[in-house]
């Protein structure tokens, strides 16, 4: 249909359909990203780094896991640049394709026994590609949901793609739970590959839903007014460096907790606590169900109470509850391990995760929103998610105590607490504005 300059396409896709498409796509991308973390805990030390001690093999496996997070800010910058110039929808389709194809390729890799040093080298290369793809995914997905939403529903609908992370965890853990029921030799030969190869089917599903939604109204307004930024990354760091750093600081504890509780605890639970592989995976799986639901509930709550109080409650909860959570997890009792995991991953993390999309999106003007929110969010991944499991492994080796890991998480929570305190409340701001004054944050 025709448009006039400065208008927004009135035939836009209904918000529930947009939010559903964002949820499905984000779930698929995080499924791809998380199955690597589970495999790094359970499989990769044996198959790709066998010529080392168990400690070094695990460290190297999680280092290859962390490489993806090092690449994510690059992905955020690249996809953010084109997302702010070309559009959110196009970048989401491209990121989904890149992520899915690289995941399938991991499932086809030869192991160290077959290809020698080439095997881990290819594994790291594909992990880098995954990192670039998911680095562009988050920003595009949350902006499509937030920018299509009514002002009083941005927290609720913005939480849908946020819920894709625990839902992706649910699918990834569920897939590994099923293949882990195979005999050990079959699991190590072919079973671990199945979750990676299954991504081929998910690519088709994701493309189907994403190609059926329209571009976001906010970006259409920028495009109709020909107000696109020529160099979004330059503009972001020239005009909004404080916002980028505050986003990174605010998300630091979420990023750290997510990947310690998704990836590292699979190793900790089996090697330190002595629980079975299936028990630990079942704990993560059930906790992910709770987290998925509560992400959306707390996103909706932020529409009523504001972004900051809900987010701050989550940060404090992660910093305080991490100590009793480790105490419960260390018992090795399935029920208590589940309570521990739900306490942090299901409840505390979701309190902060629910309002995240709306809060970070509302900190930037439309012409640089994709770049600014993405780069800040992904920078936290380098220092939180990438280093978290590695530091956890090193702390356990040095101290022999899981409480050292808990203290590390509490320190990250303190940093995030300071950052969130410095972010003004943003509920109800006009996100259709093209520019945003740096003085607002």
Image (cartoon, rainbow, N blue to C red):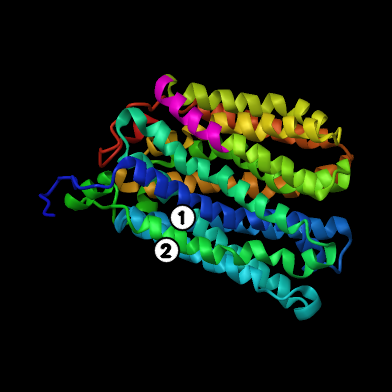
Residue position for label 1: 136
User: What main secondary structure does the magenta stretch of the protein show?
Assistant: helix
* In-image side of 371 versus 385 (left or right): left
Percent coordinates x, y for residue 414 in the rendering:
64, 28
Q: Which mark is residue 433?
A: none
- Tell me if mark 1 has few (under 14), some (14-19) or many (20+) residues whose alpha carbon lies within 10 angstroms of its own: many
Q: Quadrant of the C terminus?
A: top left
Q: Label 1: state its secondary structure.
A: helix
Query: Mark 2 = which residue?
Result: 94
Q: Residue 61: x percent and y percent?
A: 75, 59
Residue interval drawn in magenta: 292-304
Horizontally, residue 320 falls left or right of residue 182, namely left
* Residue 392 shows in this picture: no
Residue drawn 76% across and 27% down? 323
Disc 2 element: helix
Left or right: 1 in relation to 118: left
Q: Residue 378: x and y, percent?
A: 53, 48
Residue at 75% in and 73% down: 111
């Amino acid at each position: 249909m025709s448009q006039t300059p400065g208008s927004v396409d009135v035939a836009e896709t209904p918000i529930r359909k947009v939010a559903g498409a964002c949820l499905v796509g984000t779930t698929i991308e995080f499924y791809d990203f998380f199955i690597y973390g589970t495999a790094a805990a359970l499989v990769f030390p044996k198959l790709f780094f066998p010529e080392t001690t168990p400690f070094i093999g695990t460290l190297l496996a999680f280092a290859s896991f962390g490489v993806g997070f090092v690449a994510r800010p690059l992905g955020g910058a690249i996809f953010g640049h084109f997302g702010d110039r070309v559009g959110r929808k196009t970048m989401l389709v491209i990121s989904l394709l890149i992520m899915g194809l690289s995941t399938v390729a991991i499932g086809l890799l030869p192991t160290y026994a077959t290809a020698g040093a080439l095997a881990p080298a290819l594994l790291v290369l594909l992990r880098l590609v995954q990192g670039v793809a998911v680095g562009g995914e988050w920003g595009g997905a949350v902006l499509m949901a937030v920018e299509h939403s009514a002002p009083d529903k941005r927290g609720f609908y913005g939480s849908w793609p946020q819920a894709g992370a625990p839902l992706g965890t649910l699918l990834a853990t569920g897939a590994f739970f099923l293949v882990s029921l195979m005999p050990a030799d079959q699991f190590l030969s072919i079973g671990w590959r199945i979750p990676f190869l299954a991504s081929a089917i998910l690519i088709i599903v994701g493309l189907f839903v994403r190609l059926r939604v329209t571009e976001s109204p906010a970006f259409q307004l920028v495009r109709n007014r020909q107000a696109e930024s020529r160099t979004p990354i330059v503009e972001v760091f020239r005009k909004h460096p404080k916002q980028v750093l505050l986003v990174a600081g605010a998300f630091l504890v979420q990023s750290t907790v997510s990947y310690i509780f998704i990836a590292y605890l699979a190793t900790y639970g089996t090697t330190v606590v002595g629980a079975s592989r299936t028990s630990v995976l079942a704990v993560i799986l059930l906790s992910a169900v709770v987290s998925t639901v509560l992400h959306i509930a707390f996103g909706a709550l932020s529409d009523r109470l504001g972004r900051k109080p809900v987010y701050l409650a989550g940060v404090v909860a992660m910093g305080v509850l991490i100590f009793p959570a480790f105490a419960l997890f260390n018992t090795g009792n399935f029920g208590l391990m589940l309570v521990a995991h739900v306490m942090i991953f299901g409840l505390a993390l979701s309190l902060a995760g629910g309002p995240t999309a709306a809060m970070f999106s509302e900190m930037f003007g439309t012409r640089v929103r994709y770049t600014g929110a993405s780069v800040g969010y992904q920078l936290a991944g380098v220092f939180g998610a990438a280093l978290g499991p590695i530091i956890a492994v090193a702390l356990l080796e040095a101290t022999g105590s899981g409480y050292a890991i808990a203290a590390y998480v509490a320190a990250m929570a303190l940093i995030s607490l300071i950052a969130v305190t410095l972010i003004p409340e943003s509920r109800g701001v006009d996100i259709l504005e093209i520019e945003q004054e740096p003085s607002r944050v």
